[in-house]
Image: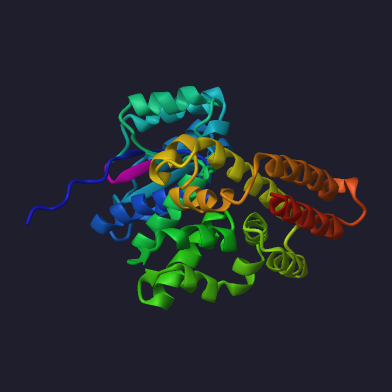
Amino acid sequence: MSAPPPPAPLRLILGEEELLVERAVEQVVAEVRAGEPGAELRRYRAADLTPVDLADNLSPSLFAEGRVIVLQAAHEVGKELATAIVEQSADPADGIVLVVLHAGGARNKALADALRKGGAVVTTCNRITRSEERSDFVRSEVRRAGGRIAPAAVGVLIEAVGSDLRELAAAAGQLVADTGGTVDEQAVRRYHRGRAEASGFAVADKVMAGDRAGALEALRWALVLGVAPVLVADALADGVRTLARVGAAGRGDPNRLAGTLGMPPWKVRKAQAQVRAWQPESLAVAFDAAAEVNADVKGAAADAGYALERAVLRICAARESR
């Protein structure tokens, strides 16, 4: 059996999503150590180095040990060091792999372009901001842990845990381990009961469905458990906007509408079921209430909790006035 080819000596990791960047670095190190278990890992903030320091790190050692040099925040370096990185990375010593981390924006873009042109293997780790990207991340994390997750459970998990990728990754892995590999909505609610039932989105979901008592109970628990009022207000606004956008889009296929609306299919499907109970005039009242409470929780009202309770009652009443 032939030996695997040596690792590519120059890697460029572009982007600001810290978890994905760190995993990309770990992958390079694992690849190098698969062929040379004793390979050394050295990390530097790129701007702290001089061209001479860089040359020393990229020079062969006396015993020719493998080495992975990681230059962090390379977009911050000055012109002299940027030139040195490009020039010295063109001919690294055997067994040395240079990993350059760059935020990927316009700052020092010429450095990233030059490394790419010089043959660097590029890994992109853009920040995850869109809801469908976060849903895709959750699904991939569950698969990575060897499990499967039901479509409805994806949104519930995000609502329960939040948007932090590290927390989502940990929760996904734990759920796969605890459930034997099959993660459904009931499992998420069982293992994340406090957070899943008391998140801002849980409050908004009950309001949009017209569950006045359930919404007030969820709101009170959310505030008791320390959910920031502004997050609940944002969730209410998002719920109203979602109903309006889905309602305006009509009764099309959720999977097809998802791409047009920029939402995951499960969210479109849920909104389609909820919006049937709303009139356009009711949504207009709900918009006003959501806008008012967003101002209230940011300082316009003396009591943010009371302002949220009033908004919940007002939106539920709007839904009922058909």
Q: Dominant secondary structure of the magenta stretch? A: strand
Q: Position of residue 52 (x, y in %)?
A: 48, 34
Q: Is residue 96 magenta?
A: yes
Residue furthest to the left: 1
Snapshot quadrant of residue 158: bottom right
Image spot of residue 196 (x, y percent): 59, 67
Res 189 seen here: yes
Q: Is residue 278 above or below residue 154?
A: above
- Residue 258 falls within the magenta-colored stretch: no
Quadrant of the snapshot with the N terminus: bottom left
- Residues rendered magenta in the picture: 94-98
> Residue at 24% across / 55% down in the picture?
35
* Residue that sits furthest to the front in the current view: 322
How many discs mark residues in the rendered view?
A: 0
Horizontal arrangement in the rendering, residue 209 relative to residue 282 (left or right)? left
Residue 43 showing in the rendered view: no
> Looking at the image, which is closer to me, 318 or 24?
318
In this picture, is 33 found above or below 44? below
Residue at the spot 53% in from the left edge and 29% down from the top edge? 105
Position of residue 206 in the picture relative to residue 17 (left or right): right
Looking at the picture, the colour scheme in use is: rainbow
**271 and 168: which is toward the camera:** 271
- Please give the name of the residue rendered at 49% of the width and 47% of the height, measured from the top-left corner: 268
Residue 117: horizontal and vertical position, in percent?
A: 34, 24
Judged left or right of residue 291, residue 7 is left
Front position in the image: 20 or 28: 20
Q: Position of residue 266 (x, y in %)?
A: 46, 53
127, 152: nearer the viewer: 152
- The residue under the point 16% across, 51% down is 4
